[in-house]
Image: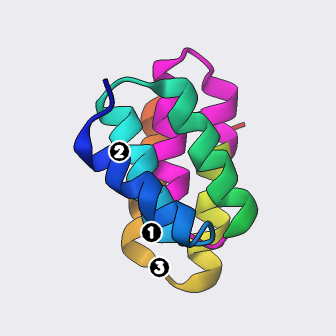
Amino acid sequence: MENKRISALKGFLEKDPNDSFSRYALALEYVNSEQYPNAVREFETLLTLDPNYTATYYHYGKIYEKLGQPDKAKDLYQRGIALTAARGETHANKELREALFMLTGGNED
């Protein structure tokens, strides 16, 4: 059975499929309910529609860590680091750098 938040967010997206915030929130709801394939699908759609939605990179990378796919997580963190640096988003950049460091143990190559 689908939770009420997921249903509501799907409703918002039916009205506006390009609503980045609702798609991001839906992906996080899927993460919280451990529906990782659905979360991956929503994050991938979000990156396709709005590659500048910087919060996506951190949470999407974390899913790939949980799924045992560190190379995909690393790629997302690196892409997010480049984007946040270019946009001057220092807090998000720091979080992504920390996630990458924790993933790689400081060996980012």
Residue closest to the far left: 4
Is 102 magenta? The answer is no
Instruction: Tell me how the rendering is colored.
Output: rainbow
- Per the rendered image, the range of residues in magenta is 51-75
How dense is the environment of label 1, judged by Cα within 10 Å: few (below 14), some, or many (20 and up)?
A: some
Q: Which residue is more in the foreground, 24 or 56?
A: 24
Numbered tag placed on residue 21 in the rendering: 1
Residue closest to the far bottom: 88
Numbered tag placed on residue 6 in the rendering: 2
Q: Which residue is more in the foreground, 35 or 53?
A: 35
In the picture, measured across the screen, residue 82 lies left or right of residue 22, that is right
| CB within 8 Å, label 2 to label 1 | no
Circle 3 sits in a helix, a strand or a loop, which is it?
loop
In the picture, measured across the screen, residue 52 lies left or right of residue 14, that is right
Determine the residue positioned at 68% across, 58% down: 47
Circle 2 sits in a helix, a strand or a loop, which is it?
helix
How many tags in the picture?
A: 3
Q: Amino acid at mark 3?
A: Glu
Is 55 magenta? The answer is yes
Residue 106 visible, this angle: no
Q: Position of residue 23 (x, y in %)?
A: 50, 58
Determine the residue positioned at 36% across, 71% down: 91
Q: Position of residue 33 (x, y in %)?
A: 31, 28
Circle 1 sits in a helix, a strand or a loop, which is it?
helix
Q: Position of residue 34 (x, y in %)?
A: 36, 23
Q: Amino acid at mark 1?
A: Phe
